[in-house]
Image (cartoon, rainbow, N blue to C red):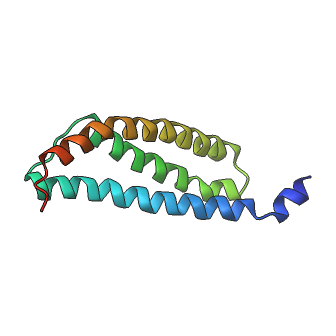
C-alpha cells in the first residue's frame, strides 16, 4: 500500500499546491494593505489585517518544516499539520470578516 501511494506522486502534488498557496496568499496579504493605503491614504489596523499577517507567518512556519520532514522528523510533521490547521481556520475567518469590508468598499467606490 505504501509503495502504491508513493508511486502516485502525492508528495510532489502537495508540495506544488502548498507553494502556490503560499505565493498567492502572501501576494494578496501584501496587495490588500497596499490597495487600502493607495485608495484611502491610511491603513485600518484591526483583526482582519492582523489575521492576514498571522496567516503568512503560519504558511512560512509550515514551509520551514519541509526539510526536517524530508529527513523523517515527526515533530516537524506535527508542527506542519498544526500550522496548516490553524491557518485554515484563520483563512475561513478572513473570508467571513472580509465580506463586510468588501461591501463597504463597493458602496464607497465611485464607479465610472
Q: Residue 40, percent across and down? A: 9, 51
| Residue at the extreme left | 41
Of 63 and 28, which appears nearest the observer?
Answer: 28
Q: Which residue lies at the image location 44% right of the left edge and 41% below the top edge?
A: 91
Left/right placement of residue 42 relative to residue 1 reads left
Q: Which residue lies at the image location 62% right of the left edge and 61% below the top edge?
A: 15
| Residue at the extreme front | 112
Residue 62 in the image: above or below residue 103: below
Of 10 and 69, which appears nearest the observer?
Answer: 10
Q: Residue 69, percent across and down? A: 67, 53
Of 57 and 67, which appears nearest the observer?
Answer: 57
Counting the numbered discs, the total is: 0
Q: Which residue lies at the image location 15% right of the left edge and 47% below the top edge?
A: 43
> Image quadrant of residue 50?
top left
Left/right placement of residue 11 relative to residue 112 reads right
Q: Residue 64, percent across and down? A: 53, 55
Q: Which residue lies at the image location 69% right of the left edge and 49% below the top edge?
A: 73
Residue 75 in the image: above or below residue 34: above
Left/right placement of residue 1 relative to residue 101 reads right
Q: Quadrant of the C terminus?
A: bottom left
Residue 94 in the image: above or below residue 10: above
> Image quadrant of residue 67?
bottom right
Amino acid at each position: 500500500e505504501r509503495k502504491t501511494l508513493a508511486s502516485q506522486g502525492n508528495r510532489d502534488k502537495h508540495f506544488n499546491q502548498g507553494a502556490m498557496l503560499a505565493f498567492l496568499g502572501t501576494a494578496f496579504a501584501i496587495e490588500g494593505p497596499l490597495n487600502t493605503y493607495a485608495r484611502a491614504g491610511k491603513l485600518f489596523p484591526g483583526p482582519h489585517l492582523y489575521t492576514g499577517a498571522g496567516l503568512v507567518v503560519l504558511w512560512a512556519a509550515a514551509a520551514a518544516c519541509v526539510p526536517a520532514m524530508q529527513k523523517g522528523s515527526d515533530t516537524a510533521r506535527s508542527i506542519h499539520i498544526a500550522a496548516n490547521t490553524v491557518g485554515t481556520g484563520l483563512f475561513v475567518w478572513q473570508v467571513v470578516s472580509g465580506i463586510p469590508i468588501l461591501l463597504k468598499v463597493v458602496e464607497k467606490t465611485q464607479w465610472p
